[in-house]
Image: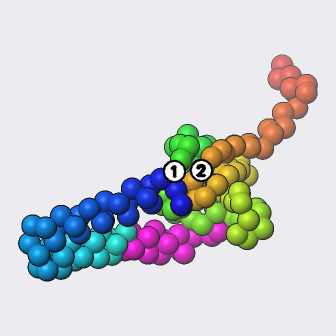
């Protein structure tokens, strides 16, 4: 169990205990109502993000370079899906840690993201090589 989950559970317990001390059973009902509302808000956000991502091809992003610039260490996979509006293309075995996802744009640039425990730990951008002629043509006089 990570630290955030422990703090969240402790906060819920303290809120419920405080509501009991202040208002008795009606306080408990109010605290539980607030907790249920908080859970429903998070669930609704997740469903909206996944609904938007369902309409796009898997592993496609408008601009891999812009995605690379916006990424920050420690953001969740759900946050990255919300930024790209697309599910990432899984590069590793399902449910194996670390999870590696890739997003590609129209210019074949690829952003590969590594998630450990649902949090972004590292990412890389690979851009295709641009082939230029070794000897540019000279203009005709």
Element class at badge 2: strand
Q: Is residue 15 above or below residue 127?
A: below
Q: Nearer the viewer, residue 69 or 132?
A: 69
> Percent from the top left, x then y, of residue 38?
30, 69
- From this viewpoint, which residue is outermost toward the top? 141
- From this viewpoint, which residue is outermost toward the right? 135
Residue at x 57% of width, y 53% of height: 119
Magenta residue span: 43-59
Q: Quadrant of the C terminus?
A: top right
Q: Quadrant of residue 8?
A: bottom left
Instruction: Name the residue carrying label 1.
Output: 75
User: Which mark, residue 28?
Assistant: none
Residue at x 66% of width, y 51% of height: 113
Q: Quadrant of residue 18?
A: bottom left
Question: Is mark 2 in CB contact (under 8 Å) with mark 1?
Answer: yes
Q: Is residue 33 above or below residue 76?
A: below
Q: Is residue 94 above or below residue 8?
A: below
User: Which mark, residue 120?
Assistant: 2
> Percent from the top left, x then y, of residue 138?
86, 22
- Residue 112 lies within the magenta run: no
Residue 30 as seen in the image, left or right of residue 117: left
- Residue 47 lies within the magenta run: yes
Pointer 2 local density, CA inside 10 Å: few below 14, some 14–19, many at least 20: many
Pointer 2 or 1: first along the chain: 1
Element class at badge 1: loop
Residue at x 43% of width, y 59% of height: 6
Residue at x 71% of width, y 57% of height: 98
Q: Nearer the viewer, residue 14 or 111?
A: 14
Q: Nearer the viewer, residue 66 or 99?
A: 99
Residue 33 as seen in the image, left or right of residue 80: left
> Percent from the top left, x then y, of residue 56?
57, 70
């Amino acid at each position: 169990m990570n630290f955030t989950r422990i703090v969240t559970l402790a906060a819920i317990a303290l809120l419920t205990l405080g509501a009991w001390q202040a208002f008795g059973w009606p306080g408990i009902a109010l605290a539980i109502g607030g907790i249920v509302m908080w859970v429903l808000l998070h669930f609704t956000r997740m469903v909206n993000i996944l609904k938007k991502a369902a309409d796009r091809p898997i592993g496609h992003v408008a601009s891999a370079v812009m995605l690379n610039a916006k990424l920050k260490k420690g953001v969740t996979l759900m946050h990255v899906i919300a930024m790209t509006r697309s599910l990432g293309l899984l590069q590793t075995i399902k449910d194996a840690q670390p999870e590696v996802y890739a997003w590609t744009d129209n210019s074949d640039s690829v952003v590969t993201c590594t998630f450990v425990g649902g949090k972004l730990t590292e990412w890389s951008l690979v851009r295709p090589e641009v082939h230029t002629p070794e000897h540019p043509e000279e203009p005709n006089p």
